[in-house]
Amino acid sequence: MKRIFALILAIATFTSLPASAGQSARAVKSSSTSTATWAVSAIGQSQIITYQPYSLTWVVTSGVAYDYFALRNIGSVPISNFFVAINKIRLSGNSNPNEIFFERCVGGIWSVSTNQCSGTVALIASASDASFVFSGINLSIGGEISMRARTQASNRNNFSTTLTTYVSRQDIRGQQVTNS
């Protein structure tokens, strides 16, 4: 009886092995890398990104000229600091240009129709400065800073004003590692 039981047990064990051997597991580890890009672009309302300096286009309301634009992170990494250079070229007239004020709408956006900010207005720089710097911010990928340029309208001078943005390697947030 013990021999028959042992024989049945052996046959059951050996015949079930091929079925269990047919099941297998495989672990695969993969990783990928990509090249980071970092850039901020100044773009006007409903304007496409051109990768060129942004030219201020003035709209005059009650003797004040306005231009609304955004500073957008068009890179693939968050940015903590960036630099904006202001370039003014005299087109006509013989006196100095009017001062231009660059204002940020913090926590909101600018309304072009009312010239109002839905958040808090913060003066960033004036065009008597040659440049201004955003520092200590966390501008996420695709994130924007809503801006307005403002000056007194003038019939005596005609200047072209362009903004060029610069982001250095040191101005991006440290690398981030993700595992998946």
Image (cartoon, rainbow, N blue to C red):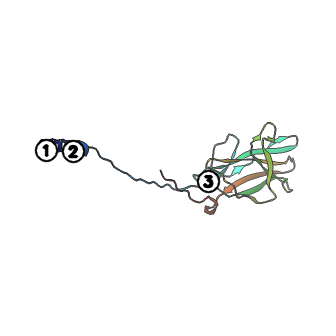
The one of 121 and 22 positioned closer to us in this rendering:
22
Residue furthest bottom as drawn: 170
| Sequence-earlier tag: 3 or 1 | 1
Residue 156, disc: none
The one of 73 and 51 positioned closer to us in this rendering:
73
Residue 17, disc: 2
Image coordinates for residue 158, horizontal then vertical, percent? 81, 50
Q: Residue at x 61, y 58 (%)?
A: 173
| Sequence-earlier tag: 2 or 3 | 2
Image coordinates for residue 93, horizontal then vertical, percent? 84, 53
The one of 25 and 58 positioned closer to us in this rendering:
25
The one of 21 and 153 positioned closer to us in this rendering:
21
Please indicate whether residue 81 sits to the left or right of residue 29 in the image.
right
Badge 1 element:
helix
Between label 1 and label 2, give the one nearer the viewer.
1
Query: From the image, which quarter does the N terminus lie in?
Result: top left
Looking at the picture, which amino acid does disc 2 mark?
A: Leu
According to the image, label 1 marks what residue?
Answer: 2
Badge 2 element:
helix
* Above or below: residue 7 compared with residue 39: above
Looking at the picture, which amino acid does disc 1 mark?
A: Lys
Image coordinates for residue 120, horizontal then vertical, percent? 80, 46
Residue furthest top as drawn: 113
Are the two marked residues, 2 and 3, in contact with CB atoms closer than 8 angstroms? no
Q: Quadrant of residue 67?
A: top right
Q: Residue at x 75, y 44 (%)?
A: 68
Q: Residue at x 64, y 43 (%)?
A: 48
Between label 3 and label 1, give the one nearer the viewer.
1
Residue 78, disc: 3
